[in-house]
Image: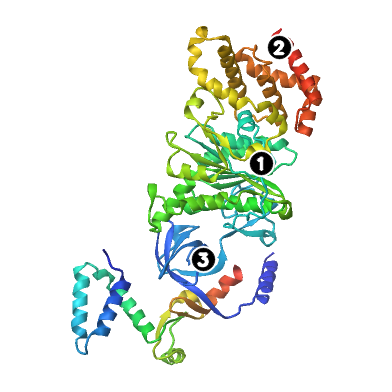
């Protein structure tokens, strides 16, 4: 064994080449709070990866502030090891991470290192492709309009706020309103999709326990096999939290460039903005509104602009972004929320009041919108859910009169009743996404007025029963809708018959 | 407002350049009094470094730091000193962690490192 080692060492020494030459170097003149000030390295480029030599080994840093005499750099490793006077070398390369299909099913750090305890990601790191974290967004020429749906499995969203592949849809709401649950459902629902996208969940500043729970949920639902978790928990340095969404996006782009569809969840960009604010203040960049640096808008716009649907000439892949923003007391007019609202192609707005009333997902239909998704909505859903938003809006207006029900005319009473039924139908527990053909069936039944007579507390029971009945007695209905993605006249007739006969059974 | 050592150094060198001969000592005394008054006495070593740098650049010289793993005879050091011009400031250091060889750094920016420690590190990287 020892002989082998000596032989290996001899081989390495024999093949070792060290060409003498001049190298660019610098010296640490200040270090602390995860950042460092470096003199020298006057030729360093922005975002260049630097190596700081310490007695405990090399520590990596990224050049952030390029000033006349100094460089402000953000430390990516053990900050306590860095001392004043330490030698710094430039690498000439911008910050990059190794990527590959081996990452699927794994949890990685923003630097592309496995953090799930399942061993290293790549058998040979040289086999992995290296991609820069920061990359220019695809040009106008490379893009195509969003026209393929990305089903979330959530009735309210797929029916009224449809998301297309390549879209950027913001999930916004106060704490504990179900933002992560929606993103998680969207990932779980991809399990049965024919053209299943690669899913990437980027956890930024989340509790480690929450990240562990999410990984467990994905594992139990057999969804981890097509998901990558990029983890920068609350305990990670601000630099890693800042880099996490860019790492997630870079991994996503690797798959998009291969013509695959990708879904990336950024959970959440509020904490990302906070980590960037922390770094900027420590680097003495001038603070602006809410102490965020001046380029906070550009930070998020350059990240979210990388979501795209590429044209066929460029491989036809797509990268769908679901950024999450946490509001404080429902204030969507704060700085970061308004920025991200204006960057994205729509938002799903979740409300605490709706959540506490038991309406889950707590989507405020009035404030939620999808600007490009309707073009990508499946015909089957479009056909049945066309009137849903209008009927719900009418119901919301009349809702205040519910307590005076006895004094209302029959038409108003009917609208209120229909609204209550629809509200009940749209309720959905988390981690239970529905296939789109099932969504189409239940919405068809509700909007067609077939279930108006069903008592509201029994709607969920009816829904489950109806799916079971159709599956066993009219199995081809689901298959036809799933394959053709529409409800043709023949299917519609069969569906109506199935619903009516099940209502009779259910009433007994 | 606090002035950086570089600003102090620039002010001093510009003042010295514009003053008539024989008045330099007065200027330096007044400069030191001003630094003391502003409570920046602690920055004096940095100010001196910055003045040296400005002066070196003015005459086209460089700061050359030559580091060895162990102490060498004067004759060896003279050989190295002879490699540079009279305007260059050559500083010799002894750094045992280099193990063997020599490392030459110019203006804290460019480095010629032929030490054993670097080679070992590179071999195992």
Where disc 2 sits, the SS reads helix
Q: Is residue A222 visible?
A: no
Q: Nearer the viewer, residue A442 or A283?
A: A442
From the top left corner, tell me how far across and down residue A128 is, in percent: 68, 58
The structure residue drawn at horizontal position 62% and vertical position 40%, both measured from the top left corner, is A372
Mark 2 packing: few (<14 Cα in 10 Å), some, or many (20+)?
Answer: few
Mark 3 packing: few (<14 Cα in 10 Å), some, or many (20+)?
Answer: many
Q: Is residue A278 above or below residue A57?
A: above
The structure residue drawn at horizontal position 59% and vertical position 39%, both measured from the top left corner, is A371
* Residue assigned mark 1: A224
**Looking at the image, is mark 3 or mark 1 earlier in the sequence?**
3
Mark 1 packing: few (<14 Cα in 10 Å), some, or many (20+)?
Answer: many
* Residue assigned mark 2: A506
* Relative horizontal placement of residue A361, taking residue A485 as reference (left or right): left
Q: Is residue A375 visible?
A: yes
Return the chain for callout 1.
A
- In this view, the mark in front (2 or 1): 2
* Residue assigned mark 3: A51
């Amino acid at each position: 064994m020892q002989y082998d080692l000596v032989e290996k060492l001899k081989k390495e020494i024999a093949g070792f080449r060290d060409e003498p030459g001049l190298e660019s170097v610098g010296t640490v003149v200040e270090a602390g709070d995860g950042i460092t000030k470096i003199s020298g390295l006057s030729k360093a480029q922005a975002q260049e990866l630097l190596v700081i030599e310490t007695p405990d080994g090399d520590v990596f840093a990224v050049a952030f502030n390029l000033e006349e005499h100094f460089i402000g750099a953000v430390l990516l490793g053990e900050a306590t090891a860095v001392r004043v006077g330490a030698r710094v070398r430039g690498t000439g390369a911008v910050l990059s991470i190794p990527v590959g299909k081996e990452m699927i099913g794994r949890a990685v750090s923003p630097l592309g290192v496995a953090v799930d305890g399942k061993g290293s990601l790549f058998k040979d790191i040289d086999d992995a492709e290296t991609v820069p974290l920061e990359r220019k967004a695809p040009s106008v020429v490379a893009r195509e309009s969003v026209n393929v749906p990305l089903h979330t499995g959530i009735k309210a969203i797929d029916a009224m706020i449809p998301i297309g592949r390549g879209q950027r849809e913001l999930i916004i709401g106060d704490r504990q309103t179900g933002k992560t649950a929606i993103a998680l459902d969207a990932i779980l629902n991809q399990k049965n999709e024919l053209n299943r996208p690669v899913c990437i969940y980027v956890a930024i500043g989340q509790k480690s326990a929450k990240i562990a729970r999410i990984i467990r949920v994905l594992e139990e639902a057999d969804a981890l096999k097509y998901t990558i978790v990029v983890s920068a928990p609350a305990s990670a340095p601000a630099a890693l939290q800042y880099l996490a969404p860019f790492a997630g996006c870079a991994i996503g782009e690797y798959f998009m460039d291969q013509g695959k569809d990708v879904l990336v969840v950024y959970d959440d960009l509020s904490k990302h903005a906070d980590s960037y604010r922390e770094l900027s203040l420590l680097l003495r960049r001038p603070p602006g509104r809410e102490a965020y640096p001046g380029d906070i808008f550009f930070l998020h716009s350059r990240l979210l602009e990388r979501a795209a649907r590429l044209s066929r000439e460029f491989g036809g892949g797509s990268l769908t972004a679901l950024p999450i923003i946490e509001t404080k007391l429902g204030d969507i007019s704060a700085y970061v929320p308004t920025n991200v609202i204006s960057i994205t192609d729509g938002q799903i707005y979740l409300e605490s009041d709706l959540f506490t009333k038991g309406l889950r997902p707590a989507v405020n239909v009035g404030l939620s919108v999808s600007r490009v998704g309707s073009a990508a909505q499946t015909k089957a859903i479009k056909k049945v859910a066309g009137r849903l938003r209008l009927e719900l809006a009418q119901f919301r207006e009349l809702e205040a009169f519910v307590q005076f029900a006895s004094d209302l005319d029959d038409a108003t009473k009917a609208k209120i009743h229909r609204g209550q039924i629809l509200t009940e139908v749209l309720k959905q527990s988390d981690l239970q996404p529905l296939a789109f053909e099932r969504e189409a069936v239940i919405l068809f039944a509700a909007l067609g007025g077939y279930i108006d007579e069903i008592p509201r507390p029994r709607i969920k029971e009816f829904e489950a029963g109806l799916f079971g009945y159709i599956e066993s007695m009219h199995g081809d209905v689901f298959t036809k809708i799933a394959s053709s993605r529409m409800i043709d006249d023949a299917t519609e007739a069969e569906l109506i018959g199935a619903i009516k006969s099940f209502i009779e059974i259910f009433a007994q | 407002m606090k002035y950086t050592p570089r600003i102090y150094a620039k002010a001093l060198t510009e003042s010295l350049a514009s003053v008539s001969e024989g008045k330099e000592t007065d200027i330096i005394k007044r400069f030191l009094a001003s630094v003391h008054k502003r409570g920046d006495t602690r920055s004096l070593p940095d100010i001196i470094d910055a003045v040296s740098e400005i002066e070196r650049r003015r005459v086209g010289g460089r700061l050359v730091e030559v580091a060895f793993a162990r102490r060498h005879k004067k004759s060896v050091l003279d050989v190295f000193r002879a490699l540079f011009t009279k305007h260059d400031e050559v500083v010799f250091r002894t750094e045992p962690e280099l193990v063997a060889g020599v490392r030459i750094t110019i203006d804290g920016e460019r480095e010629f490192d032929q030490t054993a420690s670097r080679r070992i590190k590179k071999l195992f990287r």
